[in-house]
Amino acid sequence: MKTTLDELQAFAAVVDTGSITAASELLGLTISATSRTLGRLEEKLQTTLLRRTTRRLELTEEGAAFLQRARAILALVDEAEEQMAARRVRPAGRLRVDAATPFMLHVLVPLIAGFSMRYPEVELELNSNEGIIDLIEKRTDVAFRIGVLKDSTLHARPIGTSRVRVLASPAYLAQHGMPAEPAQLTQAGGPHTLLGFTQPESLNDWPLRDADGNALRIQPAITSSSGETLRHMALAGLGVVSLSDFMTREDRRNGQLVQLFPEQTLDVRQSINAVYYRNTALAARITCFVDYVAQTLGQQAFEG
């Protein structure tokens, strides 16, 4: 498009006020600047929009036709700006949220009813991916990530931290016995089956000390990319697992999972962040969702 909004505004202002001088005052421009803008518009359109006489300005036939379209364009721009302003006050539109399945199920889903009641014009789209996704490629507005962030193009807002514990079901312990010390978990040919992650490998460093005083690196017998899958296997009595508090709090409270070595467990915590791209203006629908999650949960939501 060759014509600019400034040129349309100048043209409409001259017609509305009846003179270039009055239009200049309305627009906060010099008379020469307004005159040049009008002349530039006519040159682009290759037509005369206004006849200049010594007493007044008159619209040509072409000018009258163009003015009708120009006013419609300016009205649409004003409407669009008003809608954006309204969204800042009252968030609206589709919001695409991504999180790993456990965080989605145990943390976000219980908050959706309250959020939707407070912000009924925000249309939520909830997606779960166990690995790290490209937010732009997946058209994601905000993602919740657990652990260390490596992507420097992202802006991160800390939501909290969640402690990691080693757990097993009462049924598993009844069958295989309660290990007396952490080293028993990694004994070759030992009685215990360990459940771990396919990736990243760091999740198979458990919050216990080995015989040398280092973090206990386990070799899982059964692996999965999903913490939720590992949780269900542990609940089914298939092995010992190390998981974050946010997904096992209720299991521990109702006795379905039991913490092993509570006195020897290191205070290892996973950071939880809401992430979005730095180079985009943060829409109100993103801000209100992240604010709601942070305010509703608070730090204590990931503990206990």
Image: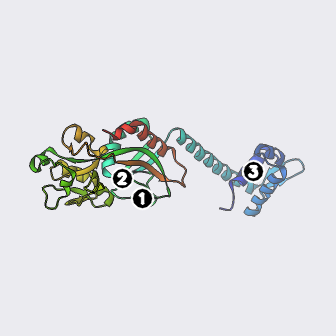
Is residue 116 visible in this depiction of the protein?
A: no
Query: Badge 2, how many Cα within 10 Å: few under 14, some, many 20+?
Result: some
The mark nearer the N terminus, 3 or 2, is 3
Instruction: Decide which of 217, 272 is in the foreground and name it.
Output: 217
Circles 1 and 3, Cβ within 8 Å, touching? The answer is no
Q: Position of residue 16 (x, y in %)?
A: 76, 44
- Disc 1 to disc 3, how far (Cα)? 42 Å
Residue 191 lies left or right of residue 220; in this view the side is left
- Disc 2 to disc 1, how far (Cα)? 10 Å
Instruction: Decide which of 63, 287 is in the foreground and name it.
Output: 287
The residue positioned 28% from the left and 61% from the top of the image is 198
The residue positioned 73% from the left and 48% from the top of the image is 12
Residue 29 lies left or right of residue 73; in this view the side is right
Residue 78 location, quadrant: top right
Query: Badge 3, how many Cα within 10 Å: few under 14, some, many 20+?
Result: many
Q: Position of residue 202 (x, y in %)?
A: 33, 58
Q: Position of residue 249 (x, y in %)?
A: 27, 41
Q: Give the residue furthest to the right.
A: 54
The residue positioned 54% from the left and 53% from the top of the image is 280
Instruction: Decide which of 203, 77 is in the foreground and name it.
Output: 203
- Helix, strand or loop under label 2: strand
Residue 90 lies left or right of residue 46; in this view the side is left
Q: Which residue is mark 1?
A: 138
Q: Which residue is mark 3?
A: 10
Q: Quadrant of the C terminus?
A: top left
Residue 280 shows which numbered tag?
Answer: none
The mark nearer the N terminus, 1 or 3, is 3
- Helix, strand or loop under label 1: loop
Residue 127 shows which numbered tag?
Answer: 2
The mark nearer the N terminus, 2 or 1, is 2
Q: Amino acid at mark 3?
A: Ala
Circles 3 and 2, Cβ within 8 Å, touching? The answer is no
